[in-house]
Image (spheres, grey):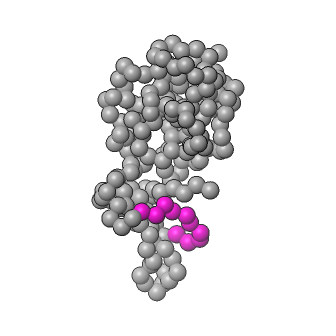
Amino acid sequence: MSIHDLYIPGRTAVMTGLLCFRIFATGSVPAGAAVISKASNASTAGVLVVKVNDTPTGNAAPKRGDTAAATPAAKSADTLVVTARLTEIPGKFVVNDLYDYVYVMKYRVLSVERGVYGGKEILVGHYNPLIARKLIKDKMDALVDGTVERFTVGAKHRLVLIESIERVWNGEVEDEYFDTDLAKFYALKADMVH
């Protein structure tokens, strides 16, 4: 089970049912994270009220579409360009209704066009993988490009990468490869190769 910050487009929402949230220490709730409290009036007894924290405190996490970590360094000359075959997509992609995320996938490196990479496998994070690269039109638009419309195992991609994901993205990362020593790269561009 994954625990995520809850991002809500409006400022307040009323919810019922079982919800699972990341817990933040007092005084360190990031901007955009949900703050949960009991409803205060009798007509909503037993209901949780979720308000979005609009004031950054502590280590602020990004709101939907935030590119706070997307510095000019992300577009610098220290990119790695490879042609690789997608070999593994662990689990299922998360639907993008509540928050944006980067999803880490495994590729087999077929050739290196620019930069240095000696491994046979490479881990690559793709921003909101359910959306075709050319259809990304939010604040990450400048940091996502390419002709890939859908990620499928066995597909061959030309990837423009930057190490590490955190240089470009400081939000939620769906990563099943937490126990590996392989470096993780962020895909600035993902083109189909036929």
Residue drawn at point x = 42 percent, y = 38 percent: 166
In x, y percent, where is residue 50?
Answer: 44, 67
- The image quarter containing residue 88 is top right
- Considering the whole magenta stretch, tell me its main secondary structure: loop
Give the residues drawn in magenta, as a range: 15-24
Residue drawn at point x = 65 percent, y = 44 percent: 92
91 versus 152 height, above or below: below
Say which quadrant the C terminus sits in: top right
In x, y percent, where is residue 133?
Answer: 52, 30
Residue 104 drawn in magenta: no
Say which quadrant the N terminus sits in: bottom right
42 versus 160 height, above or below: below
- The image quarter containing residue 132 is top right
Residue drawn at point x = 47 percent, y = 57 percent: 5
Residue drawn at point x = 51 percent, y = 13 percent: 113
- State the residue in front, 191 or 84: 84
* Residue located farthest toward the bottom when viewing the structure as drawn: 42
In x, y percent, where is residue 44?
Answer: 49, 81
